[in-house]
Image (cartoon, rainbow, N blue to C red):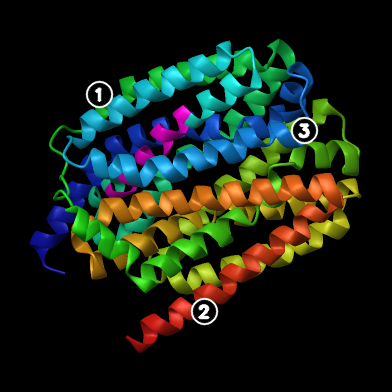
């Protein structure tokens, strides 16, 4: 590497750190609002007199909002300054969570969640490309992982703390708290994100369609949906699983979610470093271990000590694949559809959330039909599907 290139890379790293921190702060707020209903499902169901399965739609409905909103709104806003767009997204985020906090019916709450989800999808799609552009090429997965640290810290602290607030002051107080996090995100972005961000060239609609005609990118999206979404068959209903199968009281749930979140944070950092050089190889092993752990959880869930150990391992691998999956799609898009990298990134965020929606929906069917204890092994089957597709994509890339 030349001294000139090294100097550029050092400048990128130093200049990018504050902006990455701002992205992580906003990701914290957005991550909290996505997953906090997991700890509040029972409270919301009781308060609004609905079933636990219907309350589960607050997660799958949100995920569908992200899935539909991300690619469409990313395409519609691709001529906007990326900093202006980041600020606008947090305004939408605050409005959606405020409406959720004031909801008096399940229908309005679901609609508020759907609207809030629009900000989520675009944020993570453009955030990933911004993070990757702020650092040297060999640090891109780690930069994406740093931004997603906000999401994982939300799982560590935001979700259990939000659950505690909801159980103490009512679930509406949690949504007001999340809206306040949006204000912090706006302030952080206005101060720390530079105005002169590298702008991706606007993608023509015909270029965007090339993404949907590229078999390898479609395969990568399917891997994301199955590999990431499989965990949500069990995770969506983790609170009732812990209470009804493992036998923990509601007071313990917040603590267990905190431990789960710590595992998620560790997994995210490890996943970023493991994926920097060869994301496909790293993803293969991550999915294999996650499938095995979900299968084991089916048998260990009724026992407190070993059940919690398995849940910790589930958390460790649940988000470990996120940086690798996002980097894989950015790599493939740069290789095959370079003019539509932002849109490809957005479609992958959509794939993450289609996976969550499918996982949550399937979990609900399992809970209503054969019982909550069967959610982990069925999630394992979804993740096993990702193992097969990853091997297929690896073979296609090798033969290219």
- Residue 303 vs residue 128: left or right? right
Which one is closest to the eye, mark 2 or mark 3? 3
Q: Is residue 126 visible?
A: yes
Q: Mark 2 to mark 3: distance in Å?
A: 37 Å
Segment tinted magenta in the rendering = 115-129
Tag 2, which secondary structure? helix
> In the picture, which quadrant includes the N terminus?
bottom left
Tag 3, which secondary structure? helix
- The residue at the point 68 percent across, 43 percent down is 260
Residue 52 is tagged as 3
- Residue 253 vs residue 116: left or right? right
Mark toward the start of the polypeptide (2 vs 3): 3
Instruction: Determine the image quadrant of residue 15.
Output: top left
- Residue 36 vs residue 216: left or right? right
Q: Is residue 176 magenta?
A: no
- Residue 303 vs residue 130: left or right? right
> In the picture, which quadrant includes the C terminus?
bottom left
- The residue at the point 62 percent across, 32 percent down is 58
Who is closer to the viewer here, 257 or 374? 374
Who is closer to the viewer here, 43 or 242? 43
Residue 191 is tagged as 1
Image location of residue 217, percent across then percent down = 37, 67
């Amino acid at each position: 590497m030349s001294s000139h290139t090294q100097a550029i890379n050092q400048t990128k790293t130093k200049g990018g750190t504050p902006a990455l921190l701002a992205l992580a702060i906003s990701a914290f707020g957005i991550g909290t609002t996505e997953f906090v209903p997991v700890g509040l499902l029972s409270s919301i169901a009781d308060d609004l007199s609905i079933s636990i399965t219907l309350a589960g739609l607050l997660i799958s409905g949100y995920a569908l909002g992200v899935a539909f909103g991300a690619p469409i709104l990313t395409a519609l806003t691709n001529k906007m300054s990326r900093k202006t767009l980041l600020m606008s997204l947090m305004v939408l985020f605050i409005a959606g969570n405020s409406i959720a906090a004031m909801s008096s019916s399940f229908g309005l709450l679901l609609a508020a969640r759907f609207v809030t989800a629009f900000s989520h999808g675009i944020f993570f799609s453009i955030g990933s490309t911004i993070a990757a552009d702020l650092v040297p090429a060999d640090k891109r997965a780690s930069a994406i992982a740093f931004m997603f640290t906000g999401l994982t810290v939300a799982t560590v602290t935001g979700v259990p703390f939000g659950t505690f607030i909801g159980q103490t002051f009512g679930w509406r107080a949690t949504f007001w708290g999340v809206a306040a996090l949006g204000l912090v995100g706006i302030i952080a972005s206005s101060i720390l994100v530079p105005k002169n961000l590298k702008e991706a060239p606007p993608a023509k609609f015909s270029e965007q369609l090339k993404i949907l005609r590229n078999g390898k990118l479609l395969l990568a999206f399917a891997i994301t949906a199955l590999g990431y979404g499989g965990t949500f068959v069990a995770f969506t209903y983790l609170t009732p699983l812990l209470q009804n199968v493992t036998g923990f009281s509601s007071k313990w749930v917040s603590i267990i979610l905190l431990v789960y979140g710590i595992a998620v944070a560790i997994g995210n950092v490890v996943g970023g470093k493991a994926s920097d050089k060869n994301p496909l190889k790293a993803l293969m092993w991550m999915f294999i271990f996650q499938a095995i752990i979900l299968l084991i959880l089916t048998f260990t869930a009724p026992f407190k000590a070993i059940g919690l150990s398995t849940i910790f391992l589930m958390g460790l691998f649940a988000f470990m694949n996120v940086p690798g999956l996002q980097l894989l799609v950015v790599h493939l898009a740069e290789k095959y559809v370079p003019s539509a990298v932002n849109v490809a990134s957005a479609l992958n965020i959509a794939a993450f959330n289609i996976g969550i929606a499918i996982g949550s929906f399937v979990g609900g069917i399992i809970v209503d039909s054969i019982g909550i204890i069967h959610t982990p092994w069925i999630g394992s089957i979804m993740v096993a599907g990702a193992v097969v597709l990853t091997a297929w994509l690896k073979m296609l890339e090798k033969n290219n």
